[in-house]
Structures are given as C-alpha cells and as structure tokens.
Image (cartoon, grey):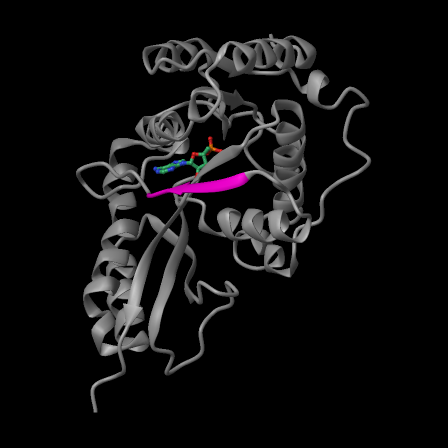
C-alpha cells in the first residue's frame, strides 16, 4: 500500500514547497486505524502544530501477545482514508507488515523502562517494547518535528516521554485529551465490537472515574471506594485493575497520598478489554 521511499520523497517535496516555519513542520499521528473521533482530534491538533500532517495506520504485530486480538482487531482502511481526506490529511502511511518487518520481525527492539512491567504491561508482556519499537521506526521513516498521542493510553504516553528523553529523540511529543461519547464512554476502536448490553455495562468505567474524581477531596480511599462501588454493580464488567498512579513516576501511590495523580482502570466487558483514565486531585481523608 505505502512504500517508505515513496513517502519520504513526497514529504521532502512538500517541505521544499512550504514556506519556512510552521507550514514546513512535519507532524506524525501514529494510529492502528479503525479511526474514530478520538483519532480525528489528534489529527486536528496535528494540523494546529504544523503544515505537513502524516497519519500512519499500522496494526503492529509486535505489540500484540500470542493470545491477544491481532487477527480480529478492526480494520477499516477505506473508511479511514476517506475520513482522513475529509480532514485534509495529504499523507497516509499504511504499510504492509512486510514493509515494516521485511525479515519477519525486528531483531533489534527498543526496551521500555520498568514501568512497562506494570498495569497494561503486566497483562500484555512485551506490549510496550513492541509499541516503542514501532514508534521509533515510524519516527525514523517520517522524520517528524512533532508526534501526537492521546491521553487515552496514559501509560503509553508516560513510556514514550521517558524513552524520548532517555534516547535524546529530537521529536516533540504532543498529548491530546481523551475524547468521550456524550455518555462518558471513552472512544476506542474496540467499542465497535461491543454488543448493546455491553456498551451499557462499559459506561461503568467512565462513571467510576467520574465518581472517584468527585470523591477525591475526601482522599484516596474515598475515591477508590466510589469507583469500586460503581464497577461492582455491573456484572458484565470484569475488573482487571483500578489504580491511582503518581504523574511523576507512574507508580501506584501509597495510602495517604495527596495532590494531583491519575486514576486508571482496565476491565473486560464480555470478551473486549477496555481501558480508561482520568486526572484526579486527592485531598486528605476527613478527620
Ligand atoms: P490506536 O489506534 O488505538 O493505537 O490509537 C492511536 C492514538 O489515538 C493513540 O495515541 C491513542 O491514545 C489515541 N486515542 C485513541 N482513542 C482516543 C480517545 N478516545 N481520545 C483521545 N485519543 C485517543
């Protein structure tokens, strides 16, 4: 579908044509396709940051475990290309697996920091190494000034920021807030695989986070109880983790922690695994 050399030539030509300054800035939005309004908000932010917006669509086998949903991950390339054209995106990079991994897999990989063993990484061993490897490859292919990520994948954002600092990457990271349905449900490509009753149950994730945020002035325990109460009321929701982490090191906070933090939730709803998160400002427990 897309060759690396062809893409590089077209980007170089666009840079040559552009006025120096923001119009010549290259901005990359990495995605796995099955695009929704959350992805499109990243694209709009990309357009606000530079003139040459490149959206990659690649379901990266390296970041899926052997028992995960690589084969059934939704693929809607024609609709994605049309949605990106409507957003004025001139550069869509949708490589074949054999283009990205001509030797079958990358022997050389980027190893994520120790936070990659927690939370999503505990359930998905190797996921973040696979993600960082493909992000690094995409950056080396596209040569962007800015790369845009969604806050929806909070642990990914943390690990990308850490990797870019550790590896002296020159690309700036832009993070875009989570886009939600009016119901509160965080948009996800996997939502389209939910049955109507499962969608109803999935609302418990964002509702639990909202309840925790509301209870947060009364402290960590109050916030956790508020969230657990909502999740436990939904039999279709099988909780994987509900945790509050420090924004500085992404480690779970200890009892008595106060101040800004982030609550993260992951759960299976039916066979679909969903994640969500929200900033939370923890007060001290009432005396
Ligand atoms: P994915 O296609 O799931 O790999 O997502 C591609 C990018 O879109 C990632 O940076 C995600 O964090 C971001 N993204 C996915 N869903 C949302 C959402 N609901 N709001 C904001 N960003 C999102």
Q: Is residue 258 above or below residue 268?
A: below
**Could you say where residue 3 lies in the image, as x and y percent from the top left?**
66, 10
Q: Nearer the viewer, residue 10 or 40?
A: 10
Is 127 positioned to the left or the right of 253 in the image? Answer: right
Q: Main secondary structure of the magenta part?
A: strand
Q: Residue at x 25, y 45 (%)?
A: 203
The quadrant holding residue 279 is: bottom left
**Could you say where residue 239 lies in the image, as x and y percent from the top left?**
40, 56
Is 56 positioned to the left or the right of 168 in the image? Answer: left
Where, quadrant-wise, is the C terminus in this rendering? Answer: bottom left
The quadrant holding residue 223 is: bottom left
Q: Residue at x 27, y 50 (%)?
A: 206
Residue range in magenta is: 172-177
**Could you say where residue 204 lies in the image, as x and y percent from the top left?**
26, 51
The quadrant holding residue 95 is: top right
Q: Residue furthest bottom?
A: 287
**Could you say where residue 267 lies in the image, as x and y percent from the top left?**
41, 50
Where, quadrant-wise, is the N terminus in this rendering? Answer: top right
Residue 65 visible in the current orientation: no
Indicate yes or no whether the magenta region holds residue 173.
yes
Q: Residue furthest front?
A: 20
Indicate yes or no whether the magenta region holds residue 164.
no
Q: Residue at x 24, y 59 (%)?
A: 230
Is 138 positioned to the left or the right of 222 in the image? Answer: right
Residue 20 visible in the current orientation: yes
How many numbered marks does the figure carry? 0
Image region (quadrant) for ligand 1: top left
Q: Residue at x 33, y 73 (%)?
A: 259
Q: Is residue 281 above or below residue 54?
A: below
Q: Is residue 120 above or below residue 74?
A: below
Is 265 positioned to the left or the right of 248 in the image? Answer: left
């Amino acid at each position: 579908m897309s060759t690396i050399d062809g893409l590089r030539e077209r980007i170089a030509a666009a840079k040559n044509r552009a006025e120096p300054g923001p119009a010549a800035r290259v901005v990359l939005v990495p995605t796995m396709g099955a695009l929704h309004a959350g992805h499109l908000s990243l694209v709009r932010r990309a357009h606000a940051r530079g003139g040459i917006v490149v959206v990659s669509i690649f379901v990266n086998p390296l970041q899926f475990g052997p028992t995960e949903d690589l084969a059934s991950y939704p693929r809607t390339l024609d609709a994605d290309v049309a949605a990106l054209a409507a957003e004025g995106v001139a550069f869509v990079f949708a490589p074949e697996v054999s283009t990205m991994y001509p030797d079958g897999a990358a022997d050389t990989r980027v190893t994520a920091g120790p936070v990659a063993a927690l939370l999503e990484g505990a359930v998905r061993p190797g996921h973040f190494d696979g993600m960082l490897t493909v992000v690094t490859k995409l950056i080396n292919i596209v040569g962007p000034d800015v790369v845009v990520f969604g806050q929806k994948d909070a642990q990914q954002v943390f690990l990308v920021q850490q990797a870019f600092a550790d590896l002296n990457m020159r690309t700036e990271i832009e993070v875009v807030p989570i886009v939600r349905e009016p119901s509160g449900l965080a948009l996800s490509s996997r939502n389209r695989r939910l049955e109507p009753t499962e969608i109803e149950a999935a609302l418990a994730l964002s509702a639990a986070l909202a309840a925790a945020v509301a209870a947060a002035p009364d402290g960590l325990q109050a916030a956790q109880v508020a969230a657990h109460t909502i999740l436990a009321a939904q039999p279709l929701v099988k909780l994987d983790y509900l945790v509050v982490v420090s924004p500085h090191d992404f480690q779970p906070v200890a009892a008595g922690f106060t101040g800004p933090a982030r609550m993260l939730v992951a759960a299976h709803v039916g066979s679909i695994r969903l994640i969500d998160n929200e900033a939370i400002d923890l007060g001290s427990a009432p005396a």
